[in-house]
Image: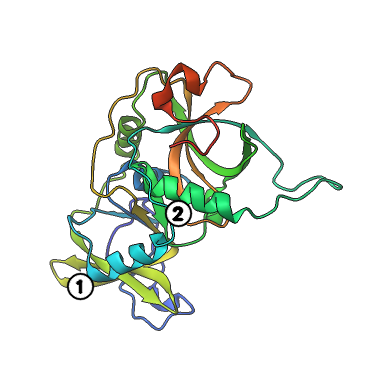
Amino acid sequence: MITPAGGGQSPEPGEQPDTEIAWDDVVDVICVGSDPGPVAHAIAAAGSGLRVLVVARPDVWDTDTAAYIAEMTAELPELAEGPAVAVTLGRAIDAQPARGRVIDTFEGARLGEFAAQCWASPFGVLYTDVYPPAALGATPMRTGADLRIEAIVIGTCAPDCAPADWLAARALDDGIRPDRDVMWTRVVVEFGRVAGVELDSASGPVLVRAMEGVALPTARHSLDPPAQPGLPAAEVAIVGLAAGRFSRVELLVADHCCGMRKDRNPELGAPDGLGP
């Protein structure tokens, strides 16, 4: 049996409902690769007590996974891949609006725009379930551009830190690393959704069910994002839009700290939650 990175005890596969597949193991979340996005998800999930399995990403995606990714990204506008981490001004808001206040409307155009930016970022994640995962306790926030985001805060990064390095060090401290006993084979689809993955092990194929979904990297290939001088002290967070499938690692700065402006350092990205 595979040992989840979070250290939790897996339930017996036969006890899991609503499946016709004979799973060899069951975890909550499967995170693929050592890119910042999946690493951040692994840290957040393990910190929430979920059972996490981290597997190395393959050099080339298999046919099934490539087809799934192509389907999920087919309608996204093409954007140039940008190495910069987004810096977002944000403030926490009530999860439920007070009586008499207008409930946020669903904004499909912004959802697609944000998904495209996540897909073009090495800090992004394509999630096989709807974001945000309920078990991770996302905080609703409002950006300077009046965009409602769902943020999962992981920790605080000092000024001029490299977020990718910060996440890698945090994962190492938390004992989160890829399981070297297995190799990626493919996603497993059941009843029209990704239900888990097939892995290759020394003893043969292993089917692992992911109860809360699979976090796939958005970067076209593994890379080390470059350093970004001038980054402020900020909270490192996974940021996404409700009901979406994409998220990305961003640096969150409280909106009253108005010294962090895009015109001071264009490489930092727009401080509104929609920057590249």
Kind of residue indicated by mark 2 = Leu
Does 162 sit left or right of 269 as displayed? left
Secondary structure beneath dot 2 equals loop
The quadrant holding residue 215 is: bottom left
The residues bearing labels 1 and 2 have C-alpha atoms spaced at a distance of 24 Å
Q: Which residue is drawn at the image coordinates 57% and 57% (left, top)?
A: 243
**Residue 49 in view in this figure:** no
Find out whether the residues at labels 1 and 2 contact each other: C-beta distance under 8 Å. no
**Which residue in the protein does label 1 denote?**
205
- Picture coordinates of residue 42, whole percent (x, y): 38, 48
Kind of residue indicated by mark 1 = Pro
**Which residue in the protein does label 2 denote?**
50
Secondary structure beneath dot 1 equals strand
Quarter of the image that includes the N terminus: bottom left
Q: Which mark is residue 99?
A: none
**Residue 273 in view in this figure:** yes
Classify mark 1: residues with Cα within 10 Å, few (<14), some (14-19) or many (20+).
some
- Seen as rendered, the residue at the extreme right is 100
Residue 245, compared with residue 207, is above or below; it is above
Count the labels in the image: 2
Viewer-proximal residue, 240 or 166?
240
Q: Which residue is drawn at the image coordinates 46% and 51% (left, top)?
A: 115
Residue 122, compared with residue 69, is above or below; it is above
- Picture coordinates of residue 229, whole percent (x, y): 35, 19
